[in-house]
Amino acid sequence: MKSHTNLEQSKKLAWILPPKSNDLWWNYYSVTIDDTTPLIIHIDEPWVGSFNWANKSDNIPCWSLAALLDVLPYPQLSKDKLGSGKTGWMVSVYPNDCRYDSCWHDNPVDACYEMVIKLHELKML
């Protein structure tokens, strides 16, 4: 099961969520193949720990499911059978005593990611 935001989701959330709300980070580093051509490589799995904002240009913050739930107002994560043997995940939040639901996703990280984007667009995050 997916346990953290992927690289594209992480890049978008880095512009939305508060600094230091993440608990993982994608590491980039450069390797020089010859004297003129640096090759930028990223690690396939995010590193655990606080993001080093001093190296922001080289690294990208990443969020686990727990970190995403922590930034959402009163989140409730739901799991249900959707038919055809598939399991779906949805997150509901309750800002200002109103309920907002995400769409059903095949993993809880994508459901939380969608909710962060939705609340950001509504200027509620």
Image: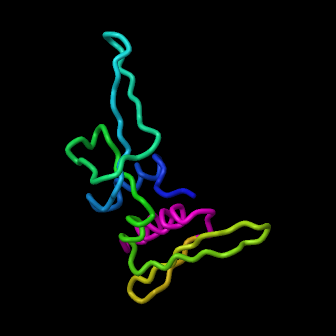
Picture layout, residue 33 above or below residue 6 = above
Q: Which residue is drawn at 32% across and 12% down?
A: 36
Q: Residue at x 55, y 72 (%)?
A: 102
Of residues 95 and 23, the one nearer the viewer is: 23
Q: Which residue is drawn at 61% across and 74% down?
A: 79
At which x and y percent is residue 123?
A: 37, 71
Of residues 84 and 7, the one nearer the viewer is: 84
The secondary structure that most of the magenta stretch takes on is helix
Q: Residue at x 76, y 67 (%)?
A: 85
At which x and y percent is residue 48?
A: 35, 51
Q: What stretch is highlighted in magenta?
A: 103-125
The question of residue 87 being in magenta is answered with no
| Image position of 76 (left or right of 78) | left
Picture layout, residue 37 above or below residue 42 = above
- Image quarter where the C terminus lies is bottom left
| Image position of 79 (left or right of 40) | right
Picture layout, residue 36 above or below residue 67 = above
Picture layout, residue 105 above or below residue 8 = below
For the view shown, which residue lies furthest in the top direction?
35
| Image position of 54 (left or right of 102) | left
Of residues 83 and 72, the one nearer the viewer is: 83
Q: How are the residues colored?
A: rainbow
The question of residue 121 being in magenta is answered with yes
At which x and y percent is residue 2?
A: 54, 56
- Image quarter where the N terminus lies is bottom right
At which x and y percent is residue 33?
A: 38, 15
